[in-house]
Image (cartoon, grey):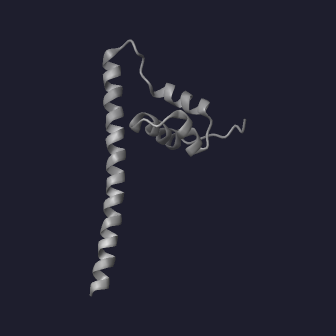
Amino acid sequence: MSGQRYTSEFKDEAVKLMTGCGYSVTYDAERLGVSQRSIYKWLKAVQPLHNNSDEHELFEAMREILCLKSQLKQTEEERDILKKAARYFVSLLE
């Protein structure tokens, strides 16, 4: 065990990958270079108690928001790439 400490931002991003868009723990752990146990621990820290329906609904809403934010970020990156490509091809025509 390396004893490496991760920033809260790093942990939040890892949890967003899991809860936001449904990546598997194995995939997420490999991609981020952390243990599966760490990811499970981070997930458990943010998940609400299952006996309170209000907390569960809030968690589901937060999960959906995180997924939508992730999709928006990806769409904006794709748009920016297309804008650059369009500018490049217009410059070739001039």
Residue at 59% x, 42% y: name it.
Answer: 30
Q: Which of the 4 image quarters holds residue 65?
A: top left
Q: Judge left or right: residue 57 versus residue 50.
A: left
Question: Does 52 sit above or below residue 34?
Answer: above
Tally of numbered tags: 0
x and y percentages locating residue 66 in the rendered image: 36, 39
Question: Does 33 sit above or below residue 55?
Answer: below
Viewer-nearest residue: 6 or 31: 31
Question: Does 16 sit above or below residue 91?
Answer: above
Residue at 34% x, 71% y: name it.
Answer: 84
Residue at 72% x, 35% y: name it.
Answer: 1
x and y percentages locating residue 15 in the rendered image: 47, 36
Q: Residue furthest top?
A: 51
Query: In what quadrant of the picture does the C terminus appear?
Result: bottom left
x and y percentages locating residue 74 in the rendered image: 36, 52
Q: Judge left or right: residue 16 versus residue 69.
A: right
x and y percentages locating residue 68 in the rendered image: 31, 42
Q: Which of the 4 image quarters holds residue 48?
A: top left
Q: Residue furthest bottom?
A: 94
Question: Does 42 sit above or below residue 49?
Answer: below
